[in-house]
Image (tube, rainbow, N blue to C red):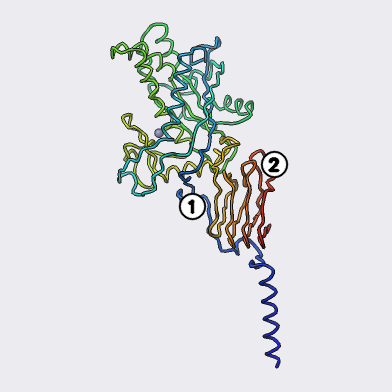
Amino acid sequence: MLLKKNISLLIIVIIISSCASKHPNYKSASEIDAVVIDAKTSNKKFMPLEHYNPLFVRVNFIFLLDENGEGNFNGKDKEDNESLDRVFTKANKLIDNLKDAKDSTCYTGFDFLSSSKIQFQFKKMYIKDTFARNYLNAKGYSERRRNIGLLTPSKNWYLKDLDHNINDTIQKKGINVYNTMNVPAYEDLVENHSEKGYNTTQGVAISQFPSYSNYTRSSQLHYPNWYTKRLWIEQFYCVKNKTSWKNGQRAFELAYRGLSHELGHSLGLYHSNEYHRTNKCFKALMSQSGRSPRNYIQPTEIGKMHKAMMTSNVIQFVTDDSNYGVPKTIYENENWNFKKLRFYQDIIVNEGQVLILNGTVIFPENASITLEKNALLVLNNATLKTVKNNNFINIIKKKHAKIIKY
Ligand SMILES: [Zn+2]
């Protein structure tokens, strides 16, 4: 008799609990069985889909001028302006119109994406700064020794003060590209019509990889001797090759490939990856070969760039209105575990699924989270913000959906 009573009590308890909610009362987020998405998660998870809108990354092209506002691209020459704009347009076209390399030494997956879903928003800036303009002012640097570390952007390099000043002054930060030069070599070319100095100058550009721990760090790119090269092409390349300045301009504008390559570094790409060694994928954007069309990016590398745009200091440079335009649906329990994370879409947590968020999570201004029937949103020491730093409150709860905060 006593046993019978206990059973009926049990039945009542079960009925009551199933009425309330499908979810037990977890003591902490770690009790919930969910797939963890964190820094170690494969790049595939971050790959955009073919029907996504691109994200826009701000890039400030900073031309450093002498005291007269000359001695570099300075915005006054219409032809030069148009030429630079063509370089920028082509750089964007390149990464939006990729060609499948179909090269198994590069990658063996079948998930080729024809667009990186990234576009750069280039802005030209002109700054008079005779010290910064001349990279020979980098203490200890000499063209003979090629001590490239001294020309590499870092928190200690010779342009650090200028970089701080720029970031303090401008409203919307971008990747800062510094156009410097070897000034004596430039003057030799302009005043003496000699290419001797130019031929000894540094030809490489140097980019900074993203930071996954310092979210307010700047990203800089050093772009030396570009203007000198433009003058050299007109004065020497065209003469040697007996060709028109129009063709010379075309040669100059091939810089779009190198520019996209350098910005690839800014978004986290290396010359090698888990699928191939350095320069072993000829057509890849990140190949160092000057002959490479650089019009292929393997999909997992595209995922790597989007991961940087979601979880590194690059977050700062993506425009406020960037939005994939398609919601992300959570089909299985997921735990997004980052100190700082930026989403670019609405989120739908499917029926009965759990989404755990940690740290600071940033959403587009008008985005929403929809919790379908019985779905659960767990905020584990999480702060939800919009990209304009408002509190994110747009959470739609369907029947029995719940929000838990720890
Ligand atoms: Zn490189």
Instruction: Give the amino acid type for the residue marked by disc 1 in the picture.
Output: Thr
Q: Residue at x 44, y 23 (%)?
A: 86
* Residue 311 is at least partly visible in this image: no
The location of residue 293, given as percent across then percent down, is: 34, 32
Q: Quadrant of the N terminus?
A: bottom right
Asked which secondary structure carries label 2, the reply is loop
Most distant residue in the left direction: 241
The location of residue 405, given as percent across then percent down, is: 68, 57
- Within 10 Å of disc 2 (Cα), the crowding (few <14, some 14-19, many 20+) is few
Between label 1 and label 2, give the one nearer the viewer. 2
Q: Residue at x 30, y 43 (%)?
A: 103
Q: Residue at x 67, y 56 (%)?
A: 397
Q: Quadrant of ligand 1?
A: top left
Name the one closer to the observer, 183 or 31: 31
Asked which secondary structure carries label 1, the reply is loop
Q: Quadrant of the C terminus?
A: bottom right
Provide the residue designation for mark 1. Answer: 41
Asked if the beta carbon under badge 2 is closer than 8 A to the nearest atom of ligand 1, the reply is no
Q: Which mark, residue 390? A: 2
Q: Residue at x 33, y 15 (%)?
A: 237
Name the one closer to the observer, 28 or 184: 28
